[in-house]
Image: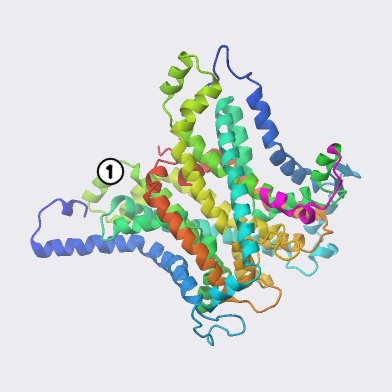
């Protein structure tokens, strides 16, 4: 896609540096926050931007010697929490993508009773703020016996991702020409087989982008585990960071930034590699 | 199966085909339908139904009773409801203005500069949205921290302002900044693609006529993206009314009694995390019911008036 607003050549235009300066100044707070996160964990103490004392890995000792960190003594150990977070993110994204691509395919290719109404429903839920449902979901999970269980939170997170995922996947299937699928169907392959063998490989870029996006959302998720998994063993990294952060006014920023950086690192890595896909899927699907 | 629709079949065979098509659709739609039913539709209904009961920790899930509209009466008799409504309106209005103005600004400027540089700036603005909320909140908590740690104190020092603990002294500033910087990316994304979709010829023609960049923005770009801007406004209004994650993670509704408590924080605190130990699910549900109603209403407006479907219908990533 060509940039539309070209830099205008010739006279009577903004001096070409002005937009850069305005953008840079406006973006500075974000840059500063992330820069601080990146280096603060490698010093015992950072005042403003000034590190006090030499470079150290002391803040990272929660990885090899967690018992020596007072803030962590009464908390579940970091490795199981990481595994929980990973399971949560992986399962929600894979199941979410699978279910979304099934329903997205149906919306794109099948004619069935109630299709219009259901599609309207998907769009309605797509913009509906699902966090308002947390109180009722508490009752639903309690009734189903899924309260305080990783499985329950996984189901809620997956369900919340569906309206967006279904809509995105429908868009990808809409873009695939009919011919290939037609010949498979004429050859006598069933719908399910056609979907799995012919269609899914054709929308691979979409599947990948949605998987990455849902993984990141699952990895980041805080409210659902916080509210629906209050007891220790199945918590995730977000509730750990929140736990240390919420302890009081005099927090150990060295430790917090180390744990925070440990937690955010996979997301930043994914963002660096899949930035264009993420940007486009966000822009097109209105996620937020 | 697709072909059977095109061929005229005897009546009973048509019935069979109808069943087969719908059964196939059910197979594909089934899992999604179950999850949406249990975790979206049921909770909407439960929110409203529950708001007319006295369900709380003290009653348990089995001993509750119908109490009519008592929760709603209690809510509007509460001595705090007006403060909280005021907080909510201030919060929504200011963050909304920040989000839309900054989002539009970043979109315009990042498209004006070199494409590569513009992409980098947009990526930076997207960072808060893809970061875990607790880590993003941690960064702002640090920025607002009391001396000698927080960044804000070093920034205001040259202007002669006293160092302070911002979360206590100026909680609204922090609440607005933390939500503003994460929310602006929404408008940025929507408006960037809206501006990109404007035909190149219009800009070329304007430049040939001697229009400068500001004139082009005012006379061509803005009028053409007025609907997307309105869409961002409406969408963000709704999400802001419902949102509470970042407030929860920074001021937690404080300082003091209800300093930065908004309607959704109030509902959350009442039903899911209060200090008294008796979680008042039904009372909290009554508070949420108002937000759910607002969310449904605005969602319907988005669906009908803004043709939400068409707005988000374009392909996301090229399919080879």
Q: Is residue B16 within the magenta segment?
A: no
Residue range in magenta is B159-176
Identify which residue is drawn at 51% across, 58% down.
A129
Numbered disc 1: secondary structure: helix
User: Is residue A284 placed above or below B44 in the rendered structure?
Assistant: above
Can residue B51 be seen in the rendering of this structure?
Answer: yes
Q: Quadrant of residue A8?
A: top right
Q: Is residue A57 left or right of residue B38?
A: right
Q: Is residue B172 within the magenta segment?
A: yes
Of all chains, the one bearing label 1 is A
Q: Quadrant of residue A217?
A: bottom right
Q: Is residue B238 left or right of residue A78?
A: left
User: Is residue A135 placed above or below A112 in the rendered structure?
Assistant: below
Residue pointed to by mark 1: A178
User: Is residue B313 placed above or below B115 in the rendered structure?
Assistant: below
Identify which residue is drawn at 48% across, 16% down.
B207
């Amino acid at each position: 896609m060509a940039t539309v607003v070209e830099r205008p050549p010739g006279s009577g235009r903004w001096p070409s540096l002005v937009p850069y300066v305005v953008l840079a100044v406006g973006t500075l707070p974000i840059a500063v926050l992330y820069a601080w996160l990146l280096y603060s964990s490698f010093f015992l103490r950072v005042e403003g931007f000034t590190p006090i004392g030499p470079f150290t890995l002391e803040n990272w000792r929660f990885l090899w010697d967690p018992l020596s960190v007072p803030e962590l003594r009464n908390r579940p150990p970091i490795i199981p929490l990481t595994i929980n977070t990973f399971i949560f993110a992986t399962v929600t994204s894979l199941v979410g993508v699978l279910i979304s691509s099934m329903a997205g395919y149906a919306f794109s290719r099948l004619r069935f009773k109630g299709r219009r109404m259901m599609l309207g429903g998907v769009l309605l839920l797509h913009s509906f703020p699902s966090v308002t449902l947390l109180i009722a979901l508490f009752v639903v999970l309690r009734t189903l016996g899924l309260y305080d269980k990783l499985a329950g939170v996984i189901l809620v997170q997956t369900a919340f991702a569906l309206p967006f995922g279904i809509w995105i996947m429908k868009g990808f299937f809409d873009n695939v020409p009919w011919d290939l699928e037609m010949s498979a169907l004429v050859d006598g392959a069933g719908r399910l087989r056609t979907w799995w063998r012919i269609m899914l490989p054709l929308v691979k870029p979409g599947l990948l982008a949605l998987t990455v996006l849902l993984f990141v959302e699952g990895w980041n998720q805080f409210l659902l585990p916080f509210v629906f998994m209050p007891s220790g063993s199945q918590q995730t990294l977000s509730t750990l960071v929140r736990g240390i952060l919420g302890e009081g006014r005099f927090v150990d920023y060295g430790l917090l930034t180390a744990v925070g950086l440990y937690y955010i690192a996979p997301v930043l890595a994914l963002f660096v590699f899949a930035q264009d896909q993420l940007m486009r899927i966000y822009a097109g699907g209105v996620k937020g | 199966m697709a072909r059977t629709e095109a061929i005229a079949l005897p009546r009973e065979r048509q019935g069979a085909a109808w069943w087969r098509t719908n059964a196939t659709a059910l197979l594909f739609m089934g899992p999604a339908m179950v999850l949406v039913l249990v975790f979206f539709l049921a909770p909407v209904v439960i929110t409203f139904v529950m708001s007319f009961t006295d369900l709380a920790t003290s009653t348990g899930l089995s001993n509750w009773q119908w109490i009519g509209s008592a929760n709603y009466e209690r809510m509007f008799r509460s001595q705090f409801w007006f403060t909280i409504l005021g907080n909510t309106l201030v919060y929504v209005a200011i963050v909304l203005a920040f989000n839309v103005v900054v989002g539009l600004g970043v979109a315009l400027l990042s498209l004006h500069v070199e494409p590569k540089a513009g992409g980098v700036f947009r990526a930076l603005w997207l960072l808060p949205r893809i970061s875990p909320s607790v880590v993003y909140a941690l960064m702002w908590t640090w920025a607002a921290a009391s001396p000698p740690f927080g960044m804000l104190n070093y920034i205001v020092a040259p202007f002669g302002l006293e160092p302070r603990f911002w979360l206590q002294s100026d909680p609204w500033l922090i609440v607005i900044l933390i939500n503003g910087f994460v929310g602006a990316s929404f408008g940025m994304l929507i408006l960037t693609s809206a501006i990109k979709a404007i035909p190149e010829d219009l800009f070329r023609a304007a430049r040939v006529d001697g229009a400068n960049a500001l004139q082009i923005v005012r006379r061509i770009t803005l009028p053409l993206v007025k609907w997307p801007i309105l869409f961002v406004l409406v969408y963000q209004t709704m999400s802001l009314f419902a949102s509470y994650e970042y407030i929860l993670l920074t001021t937690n509704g404080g300082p003091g009694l209800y300093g930065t408590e908004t309607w959704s924080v109030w509902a959350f605190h009442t039903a899911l995390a209060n200090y008294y130990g008796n979680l008042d699910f039904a009372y909290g549900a009554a508070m949420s019911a108002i937000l759910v109603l607002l969310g449904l209403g605005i969602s319907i407006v988005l669906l009908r008036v803004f043709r939400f479907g068409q707005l988000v219908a374009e392909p996301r990533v090229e399919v080879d």
